[in-house]
Image: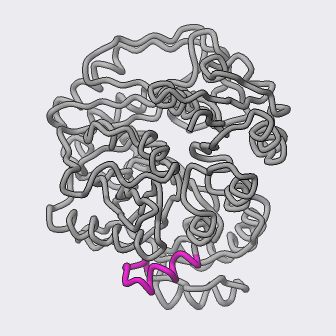
Amino acid sequence: MQKILIANRGEIALRIIRTCQQMGIETIAIYSEADKEMPFVKAATLAFCVGEPPVNKSYLQIDKILEIAKREKVDAIHPGYGFLSENSDFAQRVMEAGIIFIGPNPSTIELMGDKIVSRQTMEKAGVPVVPGSGHGLKTVEEACALAESIGYPVMLKASGGGGGIGMVYCEDEQALVKSFSQTKTRAMTYFGSDEVFIEKYIKDARHIEIQVFGDNYGNIVHLYERNCSIQRRHQKVIEESPSPFLSNNARLKMYETAIKAAKAVDYSNAGTVEFIVDQNEEFYFLEMNTRLQVEHPVTEMITTLDLVKWQILIARGERLPLLQDDIVISGHAIEFRLYAEDSVRFLPSPGKISTLTWKQEEGVRVDWGYEEGGTVTPFYDPMIAKVIIHNESRQIAIETAIRFFNEIRIEGIKTNVPLFQTILINDEFLNGTYSTSLLTKKLVK
């Protein structure tokens, strides 16, 4: 490959550009009118505006993106995460245009993008799934009958949902009745389908995901796990690896199950099999993300591998760079998603970043999307950067993180740094027993 178009923005666009530069590959960036001064635009070999700030008028403009790709004669398109990364129609159109799509096959994206179909697929493969409905629920009466049979509380989910969108916690029948039609309407608006289903709510659960990689020759490996249990509004905030609470027996079972899940769909390129884990270490398939994850640097830090490079190598037809026994981990890594947001109410805080400085330190990686003087607009996800701490032990990594967030200086906007500072001294976090309910507790509100 000589030239890759990056159909994304911000820190992930910069992240992909860095690997391409190391591989001697030219990069084509696309940007909206609101992003014309962003660092990723300046870093790319060439950059082209694709429209107005709203995503449906810029970053989701498939025709414009493909027009640029064809005109610039790119070899491949990397979708990053979010936006069009899990859009099977986009992947198909890229391939039909004679361009390589850096990701799994469109059919796999479509299969795993439908939460109900993916549940059914995993059940057939012998992968445990959360108790719930194996089909779309048409009426609220049907939903209530099912919820009564499996027991409250339940999660009402949009079949096409993702990233925490389209998920509603229902404590009882009254809440389910109230949310049912609203969730179907919201699902249609966001995902083009009003199909919803129900799963049993696992109390004090842990969210564990396994990074997998496959090539086009039937080889599939795992790159160990990430604990993604610290979430707000069902969206991840902190991720770490290895998971501090899993027993070795449970960990090995999850690796084996993740490989089984990937093989069931003939998976190729980067993917993540996500599980929900209860207090007894029983785990259930949640979903499979058919793209590079936001939190992939956690895995990169403990394995010393470049996952974007792996994606490119596999997309151009090469075999997996390493076999399973050759993939080893060292130390402990924790990632913090640094957002421009109110750390109490979790609401975005757009504005100009007047000051943005941090101390460079060994074992600290900052994947940044903005620079000092830049403006966080209200049009996109307000993540400013990802801070990844890696050290020989979890304790030292935590100590390094505390020092980092005490010294970082960000002015002009609110950020969630105070939230990190609180979590980093929280007993449940320190002893590794935290669950997805941590941020709903008064201690960190």
Residue at 44% over, 50% down? 440
- Identify which residue, 89 or 321, lies in the foreground: 321
Residue at 49% over, 48% down? 292
- Identify which residue, 363 or 22, lies in the foreground: 22
Residue at 68% over, 69% down? 179
Considering the image in quadrants, where does the C terminus appear? top left
Instruction: Please give the range of residues in magenta.
Output: 116-130
Percent x, y for residue 49?
80, 28
- Answer above or below: position of 376 versus 244: above
- Answer above or below: position of 178 versus 359: below
- Identify which residue, 187 or 202, lies in the foreground: 187
From the viewer's perspective, tell me whether residue 363 is left or right of residue 53: left
From the viewer's perspective, tell me whether residue 265 is left or right of residue 63: left
Magenta highlight on residue 216: no
Magenta highlight on residue 117: yes
User: How many numbered discs, if any?
Assistant: 0
Residue at 46% over, 27% down? 367
From the viewer's perspective, tell me whether residue 146 is left or right of residue 53: left
Percent x, y for residue 15?
50, 30
- Answer above or below: position of 30 versus 271: above
| Residue 156 shows up from this direction | no
From the viewer's perspective, tell me whether residue 67 is left or right of residue 369: right
